[in-house]
Image: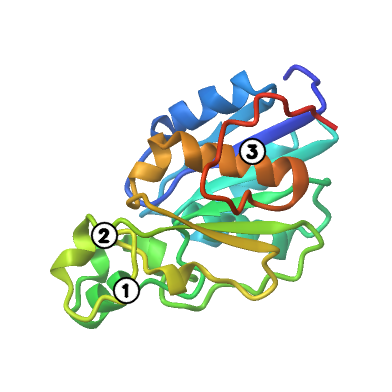
Amino acid sequence: MTAQRETVVLVHGLYVHGLWMRLLEYWLEESGYQTVNFSYPTMTRSPVENADDLQTLLQQVETPTIHFLAHSMGGLVVRYLFQKYPAQRPGRIVTMGTPHQGSYAAQVMHAFGLGFCVGRGLEGGLLGDGPTWIAKNHLGSIAGTLNIGFGLLLPGMPEPSDGLIAVVETQLSGMSDHICLPVSHMQMLVDPTAVAQAAAFFATGRFRHSAHTVWPSDKVLN
């Protein structure tokens, strides 16, 4: 891999493939980052097993700084990565729509005997049993508030939500910052404001808490 100074590793969520992160990958590359798109089996391997595979991939990355942009269950994989392999390189983590407190939707499916719909993805995290965050690396969490998605079919779904994950579920003890955006769960993957906020966090350790967020085209890699 080309040795640049900073890499962003993209980690997708449940049911999908790394291709779903391709637009985010493109935008980050345009901003000057090297990217690695980690694709993994979300239902046949547990988040902790996928964290093992992610660690193997990271050994091929040569940059001194590695950031992570993780969507949904991908954020749980990254949490297990830092729990099992705490000696990570400097870098920051942004999670998008990650159910850090567990997923109400997953809990409902589990309660009604539909856990097979999630497979081994239920093993650690989606039911609220993910690892604690004690890493020195700063983690920022992005939540969506546009309630369009599967959650509309679930009575009692906490509000506000992104249509699948409630805002309260995206909070994590030990996180450095949290921001809500008017996007749905899957819209985050194609929303320029979401990736602009992620880039701002990678650069500064904080989101841009303002009414108007613009793409940080003047960002300088440190």
Please provide percent x and percent y for residue 136.
82, 62
Q: For mark 1, does the 10 Å Cα neighbourhood hold few (<14), some (14 to 19), or many (20 or more) residues? A: few
Badge 2 is on which residue? 147
Q: Are marks 2 and 3 in contact (CB under 8 Å)?
A: no
Please tell me in which quadrant of the rendered image residue 65 appears. top right
From the image, which quarter does the C terminus lie in? top right
- Of residue 126 and residue 100, the one placed in the foreground of this image is 100
**Number of the label disc, if any, that sits on residue 2:** none
Question: Is 128 situated left or right of 79 in this image?
Answer: left
**Number of the label disc, if any, that sits on residue 159:** 1
Distance from label 3 to label 1 (Cα)?
27 Å
Q: Are marks 1 and 2 in contact (CB under 8 Å)?
A: yes
Residue at the (71%, 39%) spot, across then down: 58
Badge 3 is on which residue? 199
Please provide percent x and percent y for residue 114.
20, 71
Please tell me in which quadrant of the rendered image residue 45 appears. bottom left
Q: Is residue 183 visible?
A: yes
